[in-house]
Structure formats: C-alpha cells, structure tokens
Amino acid sequence: MPNLPDLPLQGLYGDLILDHYRSPRHRTPVSHADVEAEEFNPFCGDRVMLQFRLDGQGRVVEASAQSEGCSIIQASASMLADIALGMSLAELESLDERFRAMMQNGLSAEEWNHEFGDLHSLQVVRQFPVRIKCALLPWTALAEGIKGFRSKS
Ligand code: ZN
C-alpha cells in the first residue's frame, strides 16, 4: 500500500511532529491491557494499535501506541500515548472531544497550547484537510478501546 507523500512540515510545529515520528514514544506492547483497539485507514496505509493498562483508580499506568504509515499518524499516536499516562478514561474522552473540535473547527494557537501538550503541533495538519483523518485515527482507536472496555466490565 503506497503511502501518500509526507507533508511539508516546517517550523516549530513541524519539528515537534517529526520528532515524535522519528523517535516515537511508548512503542512497547502492554501485556494484559485493559483498553485495546486497532484501527486501519486503507486510504494511506495507516495502522495503529493502542493499548492501556489501568490502575485500581482507573487511571492509565501503562500506555502503548504501535503505528505504521505516514508521519502524521505516527506522531499523533505517540503524542496520544504520551499524554494519556495518568489520565482517567473520562478525562481521555473529554480530551478526545476537544481534540476533534480543534482539528475540525480550529482554535487559535493560544487556546491549544497548554491543554494539549505536543498535540497542539498537529494543528498544521488542518492546512491539508484530507490528512486530518491520519491525525484522528489513534483517537478513533481510543474511542473504540474505551467502548470495548466498558462493554466487558
Ligand atoms: Zn496517513
């Protein structure tokens, strides 16, 4: 499956995306994951497997995002696994909602920066609407994983 050409990523935001792409965080699989989902986007060959282990309080203590495909999916997956550590599933759902709103409707840079950590750099992807799907794929896996976890617990 041929990948789409990578975006021209420049500047501070581009550097952050490329940093996560070249040195992805949390790629080691989680054994006995509580939350787990895999998503695939045939459009550009993106694939992601997201896994979390929760502690007794329902907070993420171990996170893994194994992804392949373009730079955007890999950076978004790495950033999501990074920010998820220490969060509850309800907090992650709320972050998911605000992240999607930010990607689809846009927020000013000031509104993004603090809350989203490195994720704020993904706003550059909004200049390439067809690639927003790449940025959102790990978040679709998050929503599916949470749904699956709730249905079995
Ligand atoms: Zn992609």
Image: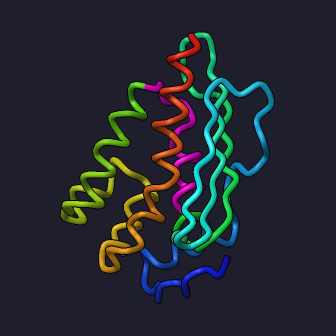
Placement of the C terminus among the 4 image quadrants: top right
Which corner quadrant of the image does residue 4 belong to? bottom right
Q: Residue at x 19, y 64 (%)?
A: 108
Residue 135, position as x, y percentages in the image: 45, 62
Q: Is residue 77 magenta?
A: yes
Residue 50, position as x, y percentages in the image: 63, 43
Residue 131, position as x, y percentages in the image: 42, 72
Q: Is residue 106 magenta?
A: no
**Coloured how?**
rainbow
> Which secondary structure class fits the magenta region best?
helix
Give the total number of marks visible in the rendering.
0
Q: Residue at x 66, y 37 (%)?
A: 51
Residue 64, position as x, y percentages in the image: 68, 43
Please state which of residues 121 and 72 is positioned toward the viewer in this rendering.
Answer: 72
Q: Is residue 129 above or below residue 73?
A: below
Placement of the N terminus among the 4 image quadrants: bottom right
- Would you say 88 lies left or right of 50 here? left
Please state which of residues 24 and 151 is positioned toward the viewer in this rendering.
Answer: 151
Give the residues drawn in magenta, as a range.
76-89
Q: Residue at x 31, y 51 (%)?
A: 100
Q: Residue at x 64, y 28 (%)?
A: 61
- Would you say 124 lies left or right of 59 here? left
